[in-house]
Amino acid sequence: MSRSILIVFSLCLAFLPNLNAQKNTLRLILEKQGPGMDSILSKVDRYQVQIIYTQIDRDANNFPSFRSFTYNLDTNLYYYPASMVKMPVAFLALEKLNQIKVEGLSKYSPMHTGAGRPPQTSVSEDTSAENGQPSIANYIKKIFLVSDNDAYNRLYEFLGQEYLNKQLWNKGYKRSRIIHRLSVPGFDVESNRYTNPITFFDTLGKPIFQQGQVMSAAYPRLNLRKQLQGKGYIEGDSTMINQPFDFLNRNYVGLEEMHDMLKAVLFPEAVRPDQRFDLTEADYKFLYKCMSAYPRESMHPAYPEHAEEDNYVKFLLFGDKKPPMTIPNNIRIFNKVGLAYGFLSDVAYVVDFENGVEFMVAATIRVNNDEIFNDGKYEYDEIGLPFLGKVGQAIYVHELQRPKLVRPVLAKFKPEDGE
């Protein structure tokens, strides 16, 4: 063996301890939650667990730096993100408005959606809005407050399949495939390529921007593993199909990309310009408020049925808590969850203003013990939500104890009064 090869080999060995330490850090943090956590982590293939934990440190100018740890992260493994895809759709809806550059057009402008072909539906009023009119702003509120499916569908229709996906790919988020509406009957692969005609109005009811029906296609296969899952599924009301469920024509955004998109909106100054979304300062403030709000804090739209459920769409840290449940005032969670087909996921930035704590975490787990899809038998309450709650709790406790050279200044994330 030549001297040069020996030197290279020695350098590689020198780095191994650091790599192994990083690999084990998150597992060690999680194991402190006890045997219940370990019973899940010891069966990662069964539960398809993936976790990303990001530490945030600040310099003397309050500029953030990041260090991420992962557990069982597999960028080639399919998981169903469900409602988490609503987050990038909300970001891109604001970006598209800014790029249209029509005088008087804003996220608060009344937005009427037409129907160009079956099974599309139209909408021209929104009784949950203060002015009774649908708008980008009110749809985004609904997405983050209660994960409203119709709100997502209307923004999907505003963006269109091709525009939506190409904007993400151009920003470097290439492990993404958002190709269908959610929980609305009648749509298939072909009809999801067509998006509705849309008209925006000014405050006097005059049309200021119109977009006709658009047909577009953006259908990357992504070469993911396990896009066929389970041993069977229910079709229609009760027909049992004894073959794996096919996710090939379902949405997908990689967990790491979800994490990075959230980071790009929360910390735009700390990511490359080409990864950012084209948002105004007002957009950022609006998103921060929507992403961290609880249903009880909103009047328009109002959700009295969730008034005692601060954790209704906050799975990490508080997913294992039962209502009535009030999250302490010093803690704020900026996040988006997903729950469907036995998959539970959450991507979040957690802030504790009182203790100067901040961190990011993204996690997913699949709970489907009978390996049958669409049968409504998923272990969300028994396994999934408690697991995600404990993941957040373990990392939060670790962060409370982790020394920091500079206490973060978190004023920009504090909620402001008013709608």
Image (cartoon, rainbow, N blue to C red):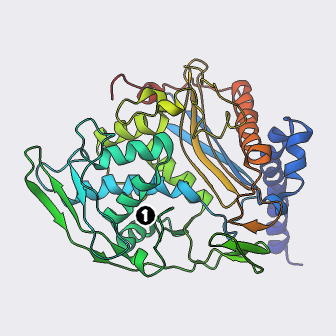
Dot 1: within a 10 Å radius of its alpha carbon, few (fewer than 14), some, or many (20 or more) residues? Answer: some
Q: Does residue 66 sit above or below 311 in this rendering? A: below
Residue drawn at (79%, 68%), measured in percent from left and top?
A: 8
**Is the N terminus in the top left, top right, bottom left or bottom right quadrant?**
bottom right
Q: Quadrant of the C terminus?
A: top left
* Residue underneath mark 1: 171
Q: Is residue 351 left or right of residue 145?
A: right
The reply to whether residue 333 is visible in this rendering is: yes
**Is residue 294 something one can see in this rendering?**
no
Pick the residue in front: 24 or 112.
Answer: 112
Residue sitting at 16 percent across and 64 percent down? Answer: 210
**Left or right, residue 311 beside residue 155:** right
Image spot of residue 362 (x, y percent): 64, 48
Residue 324 x %, y %:
63, 25
Instruction: Write the residue at 57% across / 59% down.
Output: 82
- Tell me where residue 229 appears, x and y as whole percent: 74, 73
Which residue is found at the position 78% from the left and 80% from the top?
242
Q: For the residue marked with disc 1, what is the amino acid? A: Lys
Q: Nearer the viewer, residue 94 or 358?
A: 94
195, 185: nearer the viewer: 185
| Relative horizontal placement of residue 267, taking residue 79 as reference (left or right) | left
